[in-house]
Amino acid sequence: MAAQHAQQFGAVHGCKIVAACDIDADRVEAFAATHSIPSAFSDVDKLLAAPDIEAVSIVTPDAFHAPLSLAAIAAGKHVLCEKPLALTYADAKRMTIAANKAGVVNMVNLSYRDWPAIQAVAKLVAGGTIGELRHVEASYLQAWLASKAWGDWRTMPTWLWRLSRKHGSNGVLGDVGVHIVDFATFPAGPISKVYCQLKTFPKAKGNRIGKYIMDANDSAVINTTFKNGAIGTIHTTRWCGGHANRLFLKIAGTLGSVEIDSDRSTSSYRICSGADLDTNTWIDVEAPATPNNYARFIRAIRTGKPDLPTFQQGADAQRILDACLLSSDEDRPVTIGR
């Protein structure tokens, strides 16, 4: 992901990547050389003290998002932070309050908001095209525990940390569940109640590989009630062979239904509405292009006008994940507060 950030920011006109930081000096030197970055740091305090750095992009394991973001905010830097914003809603709220108080641009990299399809569907739903919402179906399916499509997770720390709570992972719920929760709520609106089941499957002898204890959840199923009265399901897993990285969303309303399937397209959606409802006819619609999060982040800094998704959207998603963890632990529905 750090390479992705470097490439994407490098493509934004007028944006200069001036430094990189990692606790491993050799690794950050190699990274800086690969991406033609002039300075490399292995001490984050020294990086944040550099006067020519106006903004930082935080691309670390989840447990470090909060402390690094808070340090950057305290140094007066604008912040783009990878998802999930934090490991808990309490930390995410603290980050949001700090960023707003400091007046810095703050965004969380909920990267699937980059897709033209979801931006178009959000506008379509808000405009009332499919009427009052009744039902939502959302899923995020990955294959990397069932296959070697993304490499062999058994031998790669890149993936193994994601299976270990000790290494700061909240499992598939925290890793990609945050994406599909945001993907569903961005157009469908906030969630008021969840009933969640989390499951961790055996993956190795003693559920351990080296220093990694594999106790983080692999699959999540969430029954949801939305504040607008609609109900639905949101689910995600790393065990779905055949789907390297598939997001699916269907929203049904009183006047029609709309659908996004990333295995088919991320720039178009399907809709069945109006006269087509009586014949169950689906129409494919190409969505207009939209700036990605990296371009919106730089634009927000230049204009001084906040852009979505801000830390607030990251905190809203984390509040839902916290409720899901509690629901699964106590095997009961959990109402999400204001």
Image (cartoon, rainbow, N blue to C red):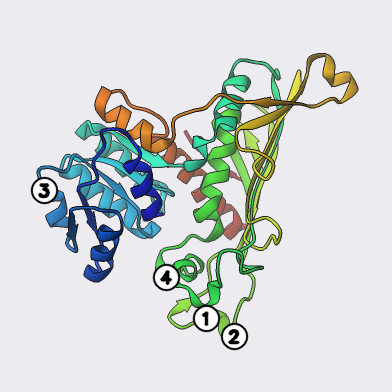
How far is disc 2 from disc 4 in space, using C-alphas? 18 Å
Which residue is disc 3 drawn over? 50
Distance in Å between CA atoms under marks 1 and 3: 41 Å
Q: Position of residue 118 (x, y in %)?
A: 58, 32
Q: Position of residue 173 (x, y in %)?
A: 55, 55
Identify which residue is drawn at 33% across, 53% down: 65
Q: Residue furthest right?
A: 279
Element class at badge 1? strand
Q: Is residue 10 above or below residue 37?
A: above
Q: Which of the numbered marks, if any, corresponds to residue 166? A: 4
The extreme bottom residue here reads 205
Asked whether the beta carbons under mark 1 and mark 3 sit within 8 Å of each other, the answer is no
The residue that label 2 is drawn on is: 205
Residue receiving disc 1: 208
Of circles 4 and 3, the one toward us is 3
Alpha carbons under labels 1 and 2: distance apart: 6 Å
